[in-house]
Image (cartoon, rainbow, N blue to C red):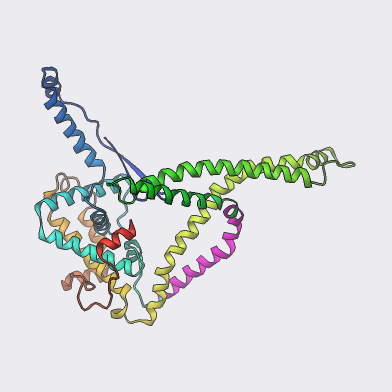
Amino acid sequence: AVGINYFSAHVFRSNAFADISRPIEPSPELIERFTNGDKRAACGELLEEIRVALNSVTMHAPNYDTLKAVRTARRMYQNGVELDTKDYLRLNNRFMQANEIWQEKNDPVYHHLLNDIHLYLKYCWVQGLTDKQVRDLPPLGTFKTLAIAWLEIFKTFFIVLFVLPLALPGLILNLPIPLRVNCVVRREMAKALAGSSVKVAARDVAASQKVIVGATLVATLMILYTVLGLVLMFVFWPFKEVEGKPPAHEFFAENAWWIAPLVFLIVFPLYTFFFVVRVGGSVSRRVRHLPALFICVASVCKSAHKNPAEALRQDRKRLVLRVQEFVENNLDAIPGWADDRIISQDMIAKRRSDDTLKLMESGDLMPHLTDSESSISLPMTSSAATRKEA
């Protein structure tokens, strides 16, 4: 069985992972039953084997909220341990399988833990942060954090002021592509949602339309700009006839009106895909990280117990310990997990900082931001937040 897992399928240049399981071979007993006339039962058993194999290489969740919470729990359990792609996918799939098992058992401890992760993600959303950004936040309110934050902010502005202008011609010439793509994607997504009762956000339609419209427009624009440059060079190039110069200079001077557009047709796509896209992606990532950097700067002016971001950071540490403790105590319920561990207990222990160890010794592992006295208010309900993200 082959499973294809992707987390931002509608985003250009996002990652996709292919996970391949062992080949599914019908057993001799199954083949004998099929040849003896019991075809329906044999086919049903084979289809069940295929279903189980597909579930082992793909991620399943009853809804988007649960998928997000389980993936966050996996990230908390991993806690920064470096994994290759294969182990990363295996750990994701194990958490999805574990979620189904623990949900079927109706474990109150698991339901309470999952609910706390849901609330934690809501508070992250209120602060304009993601779980990854909270994970990467340094201790707030310290001089070291302030210095690092200002350094990253200056790097971002340096790239915007000095590197981005080098990509500006490509961004301007390719501007019709995202404008047209966004227009078509919104229209097709609305049409798909109106005609379907099972689509949640129609992101599969968005991905398909981006590929179709983008591929068409890229080729069209390259040819259009080349023809336009050819016409302008032919009309305005003043050196079509040159005398008294070496042959090489004379050849290039007289034929530059068609050589330059041809070079543009070859070089501009390379410039776009290997420079403009990379610079645009780098600037976009840095701009998305600016809210977290500004929080680091502003944290100097706030005490730790009044800083929502620092409270989120501490709550995440508590949730990491609770997730790791719950998983370690319930490994036997997941087939094959205890015998074939991806992350050992030693690897988990090595990733724990001194502050985390003190927190574990204190026994204060319940999230503080879920208290009714919390100063942070949620502006929307769970379902509304889910629709907003979807």
- Residue 96 visible to the viewer: yes
* Quarter of the view holding residue 325: bottom left
How many labels sit on residues? 0
- Residue 9 visible to the viewer: no
The rendered magenta stretch, by its main secondary structure, is classed as helix
Residue at position x 25%, y 46% in the image: 59
Residue at position x 22%, y 73% in the image: 368
Residue 234 versus residue 170 in the image, above or below: above
Of the 4 image quadrants, the one containing the C terminus is bottom left
* Residue 188 position in % (x across, y down): 41, 47
* Quarter of the view holding residue 256: top right
* Left or right: residue 71 compared with residue 13: left
* Quarter of the view holding residue 3: top left
Of the 4 image quadrants, the one containing the N terminus is top left
* Residue 283 position in % (x across, y down): 50, 60
Residue at position x 32%, y 53% in the image: 82
Residue 301 versus residue 260 in the image, above or below: below
Q: Is residue 148 magenta?
A: yes
Pick the front one: 331 or 343:
331
* Left or right: residue 142 compared with residue 178: left
Residue at position x 58%, y 65% in the image: 161
* Residue 145 position in % (x across, y down): 40, 73
Residue 186 versus residue 301 in the image, above or below: above
For the view shown, which residue lies furthest in the top direction?
A: 36
Q: Is residue 344 magenta?
A: no
Magenta range is: 144-171
* Residue 313 position in % (x across, y down): 29, 70
